[in-house]
Amino acid sequence: MKDSGKAAVAQRAAGVWSPPEGVKAVVFDVVGTLIEPRPSVAHAYQHAAARHGIERDPETIRRRFATAWRRQEMIDAAATPAFSTSRSREAERWRAIVEDVFDGVPASGTIFADLWEHFGRVDAWQPIPAGRELVQRALDAKATVALASNFDERLLEIAGRLEPLSWVHHVFASSEIGWRKPAPEFFRWVESRLGYEPTELLLVGDDPELDIAAGKRAGWHVLGVM
């Protein structure tokens, strides 16, 4: 999961923001935009490892996680077709990340199982206040509001039980779509489900490439919250 320390700019935007003219649907990224891990990814990994007798400091975990995350992004980019996914691929991705973080220690499979369960719980997440405000403003503007995330099927359970995700009726997870951002197919799929043209859609997200650059390439309006 992405860590988020990026709420400050979004908070400034939220104070004056409403969807641009012509935008009929506002689509929100989730992790890092609306919610963030509690505790942080590094500390969650540290705690899970410690339960199995593996000691790692959070800073080492943070660095190794970032490297492992990038490696999996490169694997997906090189796949044929690029950035296609599924429930099994998302589980495989996270298992590989955990194994990389902990050097493939024998307990890494059990640590992965613990972390998979942990990040599927509502109490592993907390709302980002600036994101909450942006969702409220989109709803107040009578726009269609949706979530579209590179999260997997665990999002579907979390979204129904955690504000502001629970305010939104349209919840799209990459494992269910079959594509991950930045694939153009991800955006085309969302357009089809919502019934809007690219120029009628706005993506709000925190990732410069997966959200902002990819959204622009898809022909959408974009709002960065980093």
Image (tube, rainbow, N blue to C red):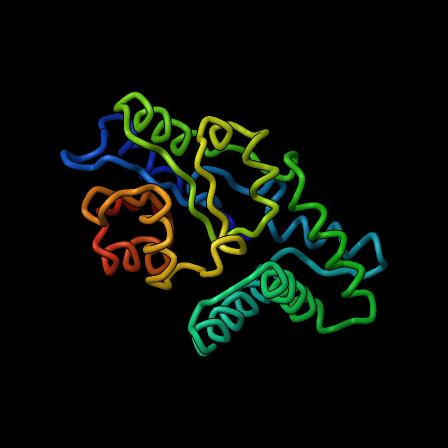
Q: Residue at x 65, y 66 (%)?
A: 101
Determine whether, in the image, residue 218 is placed left or right of residue 156.
left
- Spot occupied by residue 203 in the image (x, y as percentages of width and height): 31, 45
Q: Is residue 93 above or below residue 15?
A: below
Q: Residue at x 57, y 43 (%)?
A: 37
- Spot occupied by residue 33 in the image (x, y as percentages of width and height): 42, 42
Q: For this rendering, which residue is in front, 12 or 90? A: 90
- Spot occupied by residue 173 in the image (x, y as percentages of width and height): 50, 49
Any part of residue 50 in sight: yes
Give the mark count.
0
> Which residue in the rendered view is the most extreme toward the left?
21
Q: Is residue 151 above or below residue 112?
A: above
Any part of residue 61 in sight: no
Q: Residue at x 30, y 21 (%)?
A: 140
**Which image quarter: residue 52?**
bottom right
Q: Is residue 15 above or below residue 187?
A: above
- Spot occupied by residue 119 in the image (x, y as percentages of width and height): 65, 46
> Which residue in the rendered view is the most extreme toward the right?
53
> Which residue in the rendered view is the most extreme toward the top?
140
Q: Residue at x 37, y 30 (%)?
A: 135
Determine whether, in the image, residue 146 is placed left or right of residue 202.
right
Determine whether, in the image, residue 37 is placed left or right of residue 206.
right
Determine whether, in the image, residue 124 is placed left or right of residue 50.
left
Q: For this rendering, which residue is in front, 141 or 107? A: 141
